[in-house]
Image (tube, rainbow, N blue to C red):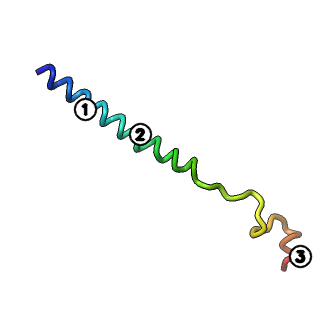
Amino acid sequence: MSMLKSKWIKFGFAFLVIFLFLQFIVPLLILANLEKPPATSGHFINTYEESKTRF
């Protein structure tokens, strides 16, 4: 009986580790690897004066 209980405890622990990994670690890794937009781009206008001259 003890061996069966031990297997369930190991299974439960493995399930918990996999669940926590998929819920918390994987999304953080995905977000960290996303490309960040450039801070300065020719597409967006940064100042009012620049906007006024383009208009």
Horizontal and vertical percent position of residue 12: 26, 32
Query: Is the Cβ of the residue at disc 1 closer than 8 Å to that at disc 2?
Result: no
In this figure, what is the number of numbered marks? 3
Residue type pointed to by label 1: Phe
Residue positioned 81% across, 64% down in the render: 46
Alpha carbon separation for disc pair 1 and 3: 67 Å
Horizontal and vertical percent position of residue 24: 45, 42
Horizontal and vertical percent position of residue 31: 55, 50
Which callout, 1 or 3, points at the residue further toward the start of the chain?
1
Residue type pointed to by label 3: Thr
38 sits left or right of 17 in the view: right
Query: Is the Cβ of the residue at disc 3 closer than 8 Å to that at disc 2?
Result: no
- Residue count near mark 2 (Cα–Cα under 10 Å), binned few <14, some 14–19, many ≥20: few
Residue type pointed to by label 2: Phe
Alpha carbon separation for disc pair 3 and 2: 52 Å
Q: Quadrant location of residue 1?
A: top left
Q: Which residue is mark 3?
A: 53
> Where is 53 relative to 15, above or below?
below
Query: Is the Cβ of the residue at disc 1 closer than 8 Å to that at disc 3?
Result: no
Residue positioned 58% across, 53% down in the render: 34
Of marks 3 and 2, the one in the foreground: 2
Helix or strand or loop: what does disc 2 sit on?
A: helix
Q: Which residue is mark 2?
A: 21
Horizontal and vertical percent position of residue 13: 30, 30
Residue farthest along the left direction in this orientation: 1
Q: Quadrant location of residue 43?
A: bottom right
Residue farthest along the top direction in this orientation: 2
Q: Which residue is mark 1?
A: 11
- Residue count near mark 1 (Cα–Cα under 10 Å), binned few <14, some 14–19, many ≥20: few
Helix or strand or loop: what does disc 3 sit on?
A: helix
Q: Nearer the viewer, residue 33 or 23?
A: 33
